[in-house]
Amino acid sequence: MEQNLQEIEKKASILISALPYIRDFAGKTIVIEYGCAEWLTGMEEQSLMKDIVLLKSVEMCPVVVHHTRMGMDKFRENKRIAKLLELCGRKAIGICGIDLETIGITLNHDYIPVIVPNDIDNEAEAIDPLETAREIAVETGAEKLVCLNRFPGVFTDESRTAVYPLLTVDEVEQLKEERGFPKELVNVIDHCISAVERGVGRSHILDGRMEHVLPIELFSMDGAGTVIIRDMSHLYAHEKK
């Protein structure tokens, strides 16, 4: 009984500590670039969908942009991801390309937009979902661009045992010059930099394979990956303290 009470108290403490973040992000658009699907099992993917639905349930406005490997049916995959979200209890709808009017309508009607970068007239083209996610984040005035991939963030050193929790654009640009980051990570970083320089509140680089990485990153002080902001004037009030 005592152990059960301790577990309940721990869970309650986590919920209470998340309240300021839930309040601050209510009504804010969060664009999620879902680029880690190929590394997830079916159960892990369903768990991630539940976390996205959790964001919606606390009045955030998630927008999902997904990657589809070449050779797969992009539009069928779009419907599949929307269906997974609906199985978690929230309405979702597939959208093709950067259709800002439709995205706005779906958000206003309490749907989760699930976006494939391609449209019917460019189905065979290889379009970087990071580019699509960045443009949607910029055009919708999103608070966050969240990049879910296989990178836990920007590593502090070559041992790769820890990541920087927060970096400014100048700091991450300097690290790019000093360190030999993998080409794929550089691509993620560059899109994150471009997003915040064009008005998105902040960008997040997260390992989408980590269980519950979204709520850990968005609803806790420690976070789970690396946040990129334009400069120190873009810190949240609790971060300044």
Image: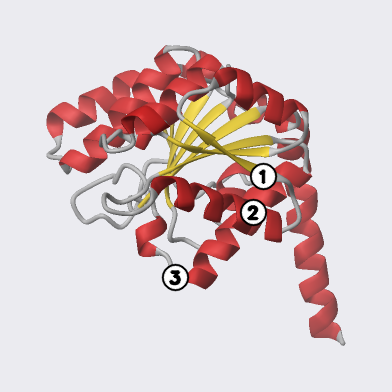
Give left or right: position of 184 versus 127: left
Reply above or below: 235 against 68: above
Which mark is first along the chain, 1 or 2?
A: 2
Q: Is label 1 in a helix, a strand or a loop?
A: strand
Judge depth for marks 3 and 1 and give the one in front. Answer: 1
Which mark is first along the chain, 1 or 3?
A: 3
Q: Where, by quadrant of the figure, is residue 179 drawn?
A: top left
Q: Are marks 2 and 1 in contact (CB under 8 Å)?
A: yes
Between 237 and 124, the one lying in front of the other is 124
Residue 162: x %, y % from top left: 34, 52
Residue drawn 78% across the image and 31% down it: 109
Residue 202: x %, y % from top left: 50, 26
Mark number displayed over residue 41: 3
Residue drawn 63% across the image and 28% down it: 29
Mark number displayed over residue 80: none
Q: Is label 2 in a helix, a strand or a loop?
A: helix
Mark 1: few, some, or many residues within 10 Å (few <14, many ≥20)? Answer: many
Mark number displayed over residue 92: 1
Residue bearing the label numbered 2:
85
Q: Amino acid at mark 1?
A: Ala
Residue 34: x %, y % from top left: 45, 46
Residue 231: x %, y % from top left: 44, 16
Q: Amino acid at mark 2?
A: Leu
Residue drawn 82% across the image and 67% down it: 9
Q: Is label 3 in a helix, a strand or a loop?
A: loop
What is the CA distance from the residue labelled 3 to the residue labelled 2? Answer: 16 Å
Give left or right: position of 148 versus 113: left
